[in-house]
Amino acid sequence: MIVDAGQGHPGGDLSSADILAALYFDILRIDGSSPTAPDRDRFVMSKGHCTGALYTALAGAGFFAEDELDTYLKPGSRLNGHPNRTYLPGVETNTGPLGHGLPVAVGIAVAGQIDQAGYRVFALTGDGELQEGSMWEAAMFAGHRKLGNLTVIVDRNRLQQGAKTEDTNSLEPLADKWRAFGWEVVGVDGHDHDALLATLDAAVQPREKPLVIIADTHKGQGVSFMQDQAGWHHGVPNADQYAQAIQELEAAFDVEAR
């Protein structure tokens, strides 16, 4: 999709792909044929620039036909560089400017708490995004409201545009900061499917506090020349790089399938 479009964010797409797969195909109570069902779980892609992975998950979950992925970022396409809820079913809120998605997710969770609704709210954030003040305002309020219906997953790949997060504006001790704001905190390997599913299954049990899952990931996961390279925050592989990336990803998939 990114090669065909000539633009995109492959590093973050690949760091978040396993998390999105676990959510959309095992955890979220959703129905692609009924995207506005009142009792659906809500998912907010706070790191809204990683639409390659998000749109692939939405298509795979039946929100729109998979062949529409071929229109990614093209003129007139519903598949924008940032998700737009007025265009695409399954998108709960527009995101892209970092620091917006989590506050909206907190608002949705508060609404569910007030209405005593049964839906659950999930948000996927980037770690660089946690340098935004709005994220911590939202986190503080969620802890104050004891939003047990809210789960946040942090894509902790330790890289942001152009640099390491810790060299830009250090986040550590990250787990302690969330706990100080009244959250339960767990860590997980963000590329271990069994561990992700076990952690997310536990996350949906009744709780007295909001939960944050800090997922240890790699930017550009599975592609040797992209992995852990800040330069692939955005970018487009050339023909040789594309062929190598597909070969490496398919080989990894074959090993995992066995």
Image (tube, rainbow, N blue to C red):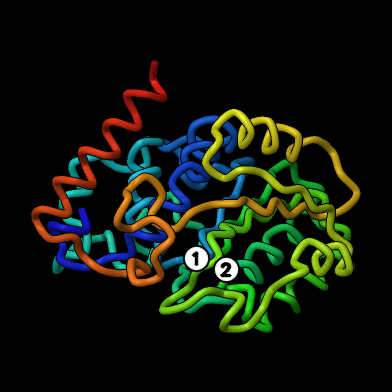
* Numbered badge on residue 217: none
Residue type beneath disc 2 = Gly
Left or right for 131, reference 15: right
Name the spot of residue 164 as percent of width and height, x first. Answer: 52, 74
Left or right for 135, reference 252: right
Q: Secondary structure at mark 1?
A: loop
Residue designated by label 2: 101
Q: On screen, 161 above or below 89?
A: below
Question: What is the residue that sits farthest to the left in this orientation?
Answer: 239
**Which one is in front in this view, the residue at disc 2 or the one at disc 1?**
1
Nearest the camera: 141 or 236?
236
Name the spot of residue 10 as percent of width and height, x first. Answer: 32, 59
Residue designated by label 1: 47
Quarter of the image with the C terminus is top left
Name the spot of residue 237 as percent of width and height, x first. Answer: 18, 60
Q: How many numbered callouts?
A: 2
| Marks 2 and 1 close (CB-CB < 8 Å) | yes
Q: Secondary structure at mark 2?
A: helix
Among the two numbered marks 2 and 1 on one chain, the one whose residue lies closer to the N terminus: 1
Residue drawn 32% across the image and 55% down it: 52
Left or right for 175, reference 103: right
Q: On screen, 42 above or below 110?
A: above
Residue type beneath disc 1 = Lys
Residue drawn 40% across the image and 70% down it: 230
Name the spot of residue 246 as percent of width and height, x first. Answer: 21, 42
Residue drawn 82% across the image and 56% down it: 147
Quarter-of-image position of residue 154: bottom right
